[in-house]
Image (cartoon, rainbow, N blue to C red):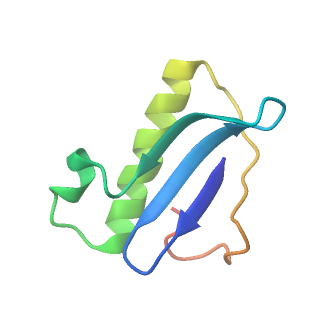
């Protein structure tokens, strides 16, 4: 699972490293999240919940977390 955060958005992807393909992705720009008027940490929590649901649907039970060089606090932690 790779996570990227910009100043306004957060993105998460489930990537199959062997195949080099994205299995599932979620971001704060999706309609179900962007319509809600919440702060950035709450957006990150919603993205985490959404990527978790998509992982369950894809049959993924565990992932390795790639924070992309970002420190593990704030929005990355959620």
Does residue 31 appear to the left or right of 20 in the view shown? left
Camera-nearest residue between 25 and 63: 25
Does residue 39 appear to the left or right of 16 in the view shown? left
Q: Where is residue 51 in the image (x, y as percent from the top left)?
A: 48, 41
Occupied quadrant, residue 60:
top right
Q: Is residue 53 visible?
A: yes
Occupied quadrant, residue 73:
bottom right
Camera-nearest residue between 67 and 6: 6
Does residue 25 appear to the left or right of 73 in the view shown? left
Q: Where is residue 11 in the image (x, y as percent from the top left)?
A: 49, 57
Q: Where is residue 70 in the image (x, y as percent from the top left)?
A: 67, 75
Identify the residue at horizontal 52%, vertical 70% (top origin). Answer: 5
Q: Given the current orientation, which residue lies at the most extreme right position?
A: 18
Image label count:
0
Q: Given the current orientation, which residue lies at the most extreme front position?
A: 20
Identify the residue at horizontal 72%, vertical 39% (top origin). Answer: 63
Q: Is residue 76 visible?
A: no
Q: Position of residue 68 (x, y in %)?
A: 70, 67
- Check the image and report above or below for 50 versus 55: below
- Check the image and report above or below for 23 versus 41: above
- Check the image and report above or below for 42 versus 64: below
Identify the residue at horizontal 47%, vertical 30% (top origin). Answer: 54
Identify the residue at horizontal 42%, vertical 44% (top origin). Answer: 49
């Amino acid at each position: 699972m790779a996570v990227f955060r910009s100043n306004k958005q957060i993105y998460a992807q489930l990537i199959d490293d062997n195949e080099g393909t994205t299995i599932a992705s979620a971001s704060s720009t999706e309609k179900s999240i962007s319509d809600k008027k919440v702060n950035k940490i709450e957006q990150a929590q919603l993205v985490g919940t959404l990527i978790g649901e998509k992982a369950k649907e894809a049959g993924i039970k565990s992932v390795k977390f790639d924070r992309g060089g970002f420190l593990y606090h704030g929005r990355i932690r959620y």
